Image (cartoon, rainbow, N blue to C red):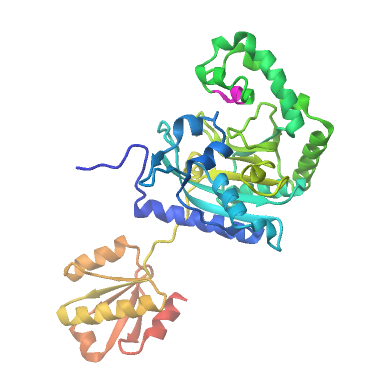
Amino acid sequence: MIQIPRGTKDLLPEETAKWQVIEKVIRDTCDVFQYKEIRTPIFEHTDLFTRSVGDTTDIVQKEMYTFTDRGDRSLTLRPEGTASVVRSYVENKMFGWVNQPVKLYYLGPMFRYERQQAGRYRQFVQFGIEAIGSNDPAIDAEVMALAMSVYKKMGLEKVKLVLNSLGDAESRNAHKEALIQHFEGRIGEFCSDCQSRLTKNPLRILDCKKDRDHELMATAPKLPDYLNEDSKNYFEKVQAYLNELDIPFELDPNLVRGLDYYNHTAFEIMSEGEGFGSITTLAGGGRYNGLVSELGGPDDTPGIGFAMSVERLLLALEAEGKAVQTIENVSFYIAAMDEESKVAAVKLTHNLRVNGISAETDYLNRKVKAQMKSADRLEATYAIIIGETEMETGIAKAKNLQTGESVEFSLADGLNELKKLVS
């Protein structure tokens, strides 16, 4: 028997109903915030991710699904969404659009070869937004507000927003030199990944999971201490806007996003639900003001965005004991007593469906008693039984399975009466 690949998951109908609810909340929220959907390819040229995500990141070094196609081109299944969106922004010259900033969202599968654990799969679904073209700290607050709105609408209560500033290029370079001086004398005590990152991107050392308990981690230079005045002022304005929007947040000087393109505002949203697990991050994002130019777009084009895992959102809801309210019941179940009646049942079922009313009938040629049990399992609101009498008179009854009340209607032209029952 061929089984599902490791790190992937089948979503069966009961589960997909929950996903559809979440997806609707996401799309509705993006609509009111004026973010429009973009759909990019599942795979891209590998260079896109090595240039944007960073060749010192775990994603590029260890987790990408990369292959060579028949034209000897190196392609990669997308491990994250921002690089693809920015590539499309540049390629389609969105910087020339009349409405600026360009506000986009995506919702789809990503792929990373990593160890499977709760809420983390090798194929996973991310929802993310990108606001490109504005350097206003107010839009940083808007991006975080949108993410928090999705969690609030889904009913999550035990979530917190954690905030940090990575500063501009000048601030990061000053911090980089301080980190190199701090770690280089004892870098041999760290893992091979940290050793290779010392001169290229020492900030990534602070994000290392293997060496996070090393004593030098606790005393490492903090980025906020190296922010210049412009970076400090920008970060203070972001915080002021969040306060005006009544969005609580915590400052964490050790917060480091795992991708190289981030600068200035960086944030994560975490679950504080009991039993959620040791990895508490639900969503993360930040500014990437140099990424557009890195991928061939206009210089100094700013951008900010976030990505959230739908799988981890479901885990957080479970940790808080919050059920996703789905609507799965059938409005009408039409049962047939014989072969002639079955033709009428199939026709009535079809007419209800094409008029936007959910309906079901039997396709296993079962007795009426078995059909009614099926109606109960489907939580049908009304049951209609068609037999010899109904065929002769042309009149049938729709019985409310909760109240027991029945309403007569014409099999020939009683569709409007059935519509009224469920309107």
Give the residue displayed 37% in from the left and 49% down from the top. Answer: 11
Image position of 165 (left or right of 402): right
Q: Quadrant of the N terminus?
A: top left
Q: Residue furthest front?
A: 71
Q: Decide which of 414, 109 is in the foreground and name it.
A: 109
The location of residue 105, given as percent across then percent down, is 58, 54
Relative to 176, say whether 53 is above or below: below
Residue occupying the point 58% across, 47% down: 151
* Image x and y of residue 186, in percent: 60, 9
- Is residue 275 something that shows in the picture? no
Total numbered labels placed on residues in the image: 0
Q: Is residue 277 left or right of residue 418?
A: right
Whether residue 246 can be seen here:
yes
Quadrant hosting residue 233: top right
x then y, percent, for residue 243:
77, 43
Q: Quadrant of residue 196?
A: top right
**Residue sitting at x 70%, y 27%:** 253
In the image, which residues are magenta?
A: 204-208
Q: In the rendered structure, does residue 122 fall within the stretch colored magenta? A: no
In the image, taking residue 408 as reference, residue 84 lies left or right, namely right
Please state the horizontal and vertical placement of residue 19, each as a whole percent of the image.
45, 53
Residue 252: quarter of image: top right
Chief secondary structure of the magenta portion: helix
In front here: 261 or 386?
261
